[in-house]
Image (cartoon, grey):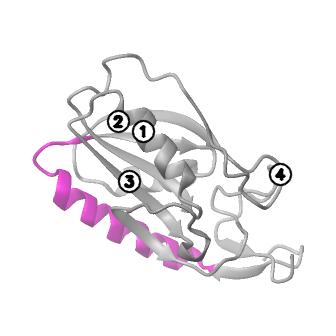
Amino acid sequence: MPDDGLTLLISEEDLRSAVGTLAGQIDQDYASTGLVVVCVLKGATIFTADLLRQLKSNVHRLEFLRASSYGSGTESSGSVRVEGSIPDGLIAGQHVLIVDDIADTGHTCVAVTKYLGEMGPASLRYCTLLDKPDRREVEVEYDYVGFTIPNHFVVGYGMDLDERYRGLPAIYYFPNP
């Protein structure tokens, strides 16, 4: 356990189990069509890698987008920057799964869905490892959710605080920020 006053929220074992469950749900929906996976950088990288190893559906492509609303703080700015290099026509007519680390305000989901939706996918679904509905500012629906958590700022398993803690194998929070 890290020595920075962090408290364990979700163990490695619980993460493995949830990723397997999510992969099974996704496989049910994409078994006959296959899918394109779009990872939202940087926080969802580890989750996406683990999910890909569990999926049995045909993954046609893996693409990456960067979406950021935090900067170096612990509060979302509410303004999301989406940056990507997905070439025109690459996902047109494809079944696309967006994989994100955490859903809180909903602004990232709206921005990324709009960005990719303009590229003409056959379908677009959103998978998030963590959902913090108490922080929601816009109404959004997530198709696949690993865990619903309380309103804590979390780190580990790819998620960071100013680029620190990404490599922790479990998910932790600061009890008194």
- The answer to which of marks 4 and 3 sits earlier in the sequence is 3
Residue type for callout 3: Tyr
Q: Position of residue 2 (x, y in %)?
A: 82, 73
The magenta stretch is 10-35
Does residue 83 sit above or below 80 in this rendering? above
Which residue does the image show at 83% across and 51% down from the upper left? 162
Dot 4 falls on a residue whose secondary structure is loop
- The answer to which of marks 1 and 3 sits earlier in the sequence is 1
- Write down the residue under mark 3: 126
Which residue does the image show at 51% across and 42% down from the upper left? 111
- Circle 4 or circle 3, nearest the eye: 3
- Write down the residue under mark 4: 162
- The answer to which of marks 2 and 3 sits earlier in the sequence is 2
- For the C terminus, the quadrant is bottom right
Viewer-proximal residue among 91 and 24: 91
Residue type for callout 1: Lys
